């Protein structure tokens, strides 16, 4: 793989992804003010897939990869995340907790795929886990406070993100993997399950009422989540990983929670409790050790 430094264009792409994904959590909260979690999920994937199916050829991959990714990343990751945000997870803390997908991925890759991990990666995992315990222990039940159920659902969403990472890893090893086409066609999979869950959880009448009252706030959230956060950011990020070593690209993800926390504070007026700041610092430190530790101690495994 190419060992040249990131170009100015690559840096701009990386920072575009950071901003899009960092603001993503505030936009989700905005969308959930008008739409239920399951309906927001359905409409997100309608926007990310249906307008493009006639123009984007299906990836040369077995359907099982598209279905597995669509269910894990769509229904699993975002179904749980939207529920968590709906039931009291703050946008800022969600941006932190979701990044622990890196550690779930490490654990599953080591146990299920037999991929070796460095000692620094296990150390980073331990530090981040301690940070998560601090964040979970600082939950509250008042306005603008993170609830325990919201935290648990968001951690579950991070786990499902890790599952989808393993699906992508297998897909890239099996056939021709084109990021944009893959995300467009896999986004077709969650639409019916999300609509079915919306009808079951909310009731057909409530779903109809939400669609009839669809306003500019809901439209902005759905378009942002479907076009920017799903299609554009994912494609840009994957392109960077295809052009450069993962160790050079993935540390940029450390900035996503920073943008998320600042955006949630500015736009939503969220306040982070002191122990949550300590926990956030531990999670970010653990992520840094996980992603950069190999550079400090090449010999350790």
Image (cartoon, rainbow, N blue to C red):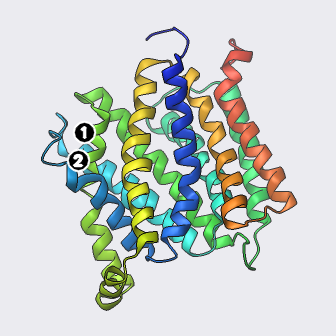
* Number of numbered callouts drawn: 2
Residue under the point 62% across and 30% down: 251
Residue 120, placed above or below residue 160: above
Looking at the picture, tell me which residue is in the foreground, 281 or 173: 281
Q: Which residue is mark 2?
A: 185
Question: Which quarter of the figure is the N terminus placed in?
Answer: top left
Residue under the point 58% across and 60% down: 26
Looking at the picture, tell me which residue is in the foreground, 11 or 297: 11
The dot on residue 181 is 1
Give how far across and how far down residue 78 sits, in percent. 45, 60
Do the numbered discs 2 and 1 sit on residues whose CB atoms are within 8 Å?
yes
Residue under the point 16% across and 33% down: 60
Q: Quadrant of residue 42?
A: bottom left
What is the crowding at mark 2: few (fewer than 14 residues within 10 Å), some, or many (at least 20)?
many
Residue 93, placed above or below residue 59: below
What is the crowding at mark 1: few (fewer than 14 residues within 10 Å), some, or many (at least 20)?
many
Question: Which quarter of the figure is the C terminus placed in?
Answer: top right
Give how far across and how far down residue 109 sits, in percent. 49, 35
């Amino acid at each position: 793989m190419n060992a040249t430094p990131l170009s100015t264009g690559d840096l701009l792409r990386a920072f575009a992804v950071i901003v899009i994904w960092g603001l993503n959590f505030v936009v989700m909260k905005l969308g959930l003010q008008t739409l239920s979690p399951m309906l927001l999920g359905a409409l997100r994937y309608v926007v990310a897939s249906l307008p493009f199916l006639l123009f984007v050829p299906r990836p040369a991959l077995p359907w099982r990869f598209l279905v597995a990714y669509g269910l894990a990343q769509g229904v699993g990751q975002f179904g749980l995340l939207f529920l968590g945000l709906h039931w009291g997870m703050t946008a800022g803390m969600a941006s932190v907790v979701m990044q622990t997908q890196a550690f779930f991925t490490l654990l599953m890759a080591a146990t299920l795929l037999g991929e070796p991990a460095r000692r620094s990666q296990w150390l980073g995992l331990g530090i981040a886990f301690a940070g998560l315990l601090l964040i979970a222990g600082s939950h509250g039940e008042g306005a603008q406070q993170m609830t325990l159920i919201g935290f648990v659902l968001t951690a579950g969403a991070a786990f499902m993100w890790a599952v989808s990472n393993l699906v992508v890893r297998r897909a890239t090893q099996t056939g021709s993997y084109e990021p944009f086409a893959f995300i467009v066609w896999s986004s077709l999979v969650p639409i019916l399950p999300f609509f079915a869950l919306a009808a079951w959880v909310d009731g057909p009448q409530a779903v109809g009422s939400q669609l009839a009252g669809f306003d500019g706030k809901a439209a902005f959230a759905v378009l942002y989540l479907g076009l920017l956060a799903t299609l554009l950011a994912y494609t840009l990020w994957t392109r960077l990983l295809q052009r450069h070593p993962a160790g050079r690209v993935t540390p940029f993800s450390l900035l996503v929670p920073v943008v998320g926390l600042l955006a949630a504070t500015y736009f939503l007026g969220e306040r982070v409790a002191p122990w949550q700041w300590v926990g956030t610092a531990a999670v970010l430190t653990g992520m840094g050790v996980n992603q950069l530790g190999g550079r400090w101690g090449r010999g350790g495994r």
